[in-house]
Image (tube, rainbow, N blue to C red):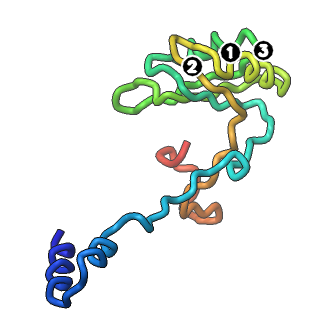
């Protein structure tokens, strides 16, 4: 706000035309960053671990396991929850025994309703290392308080 007042007073003193002053603070030349398109976002390679998004806040891991087990042998199903409230963050992971079961799970549940919400199923992408994470560091000895 102070910078704008200073610029306005400087514009008045230097006899800048109002249209030039307006151009100085215009956002017409501002270009937002481009949205990533489907070509830019790499698709995950087929694997047995599925990423499930769009979950209801009240969805439990048991309900997720039950819904996906009709398409194959589910090894594990986990809904990611908030540490404070205990409610779902709206996404989770389902791990199948085979790639074929995982493909059936995606085909059967992607875009379908689960507890009143439309969910989306896709192959999970591998986790990227944390920023500044050095695997060779002597301090990285599998701390129980680190990333799990």
**How far is the residue under mark 1 from the one under mark 3?**
7 Å
**How far is the residue under mark 2 from the one under mark 3?**
21 Å
Crowdedness near tag 2: few (<14), some (14–19) or many (≥20) residues, C-alpha within 10 Å: some
Residue at x-position 63% and y-position 10%: 66
Q: Earlier in the sequence, mark 2 or mark 1?
A: 1
Q: Looking at the picture, how far across and down is residue 143, in whole percent?
A: 52, 49
Crowdedness near tag 1: few (<14), some (14–19) or many (≥20) residues, C-alpha within 10 Å: many
Q: Earlier in the sequence, mark 2 or mark 3?
A: 3
Element carrying mark 1: helix
Quarter containing the C terminus: top right
User: On screen, 73 above or below 34?
Assistant: above
Residue with the mark numbered 1: 68
Q: Which quarter of the picture shows residue 139? A: bottom right
Residue 115 vs residue 126, the one in the foreground: 115
Residue with the mark numbered 2: 118
Residue 27 vs residue 1, the one in the foreground: 27
Q: Is residue 83 left or right of residue 38?
A: left
Q: Is residue 81 left or right of residue 107?
A: left
Residue at x-position 41% and y-position 24%: 87
User: On screen, 95 above or below 9?
Assistant: above
Element carrying mark 2: strand
Q: Are marks 2 and 1 in contact (CB under 8 Å)?
A: no
Q: Looking at the picture, how far across and down is residue 59, in whole percent?
A: 50, 17
Q: Are marks 1 and 3 in contact (CB under 8 Å)?
A: yes
Residue with the mark numbered 3: 72
């Amino acid at each position: 706000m102070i910078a704008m007042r200073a610029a306005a007073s400087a514009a008045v003193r230097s006899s800048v035309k109002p249209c030039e002053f307006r151009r100085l603070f215009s956002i017409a030349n501002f270009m937002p960053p481009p949205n990533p398109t489907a070509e830019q976002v790499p698709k995950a390679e087929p694997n047995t671990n599925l990423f499930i998004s769009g979950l209801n806040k009240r969805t439990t891991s048991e309900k997720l396991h039950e819904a996906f087990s009709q398409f194959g042998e589910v090894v594990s199903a986990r809904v990611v929850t908030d540490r404070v409230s205990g409610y779902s963050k709206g996404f989770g992971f389902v791990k199948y025994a085979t790639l074929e079961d995982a493909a059936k799970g995606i085909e059967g549940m992607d875009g379908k309703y689960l507890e009143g919400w439309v969910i989306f199923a896709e192959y999970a992408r591998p986790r990227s290392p944390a920023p500044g994470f050095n695997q060779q560091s002597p301090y990285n000895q599998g701390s129980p308080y680190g990333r799990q």
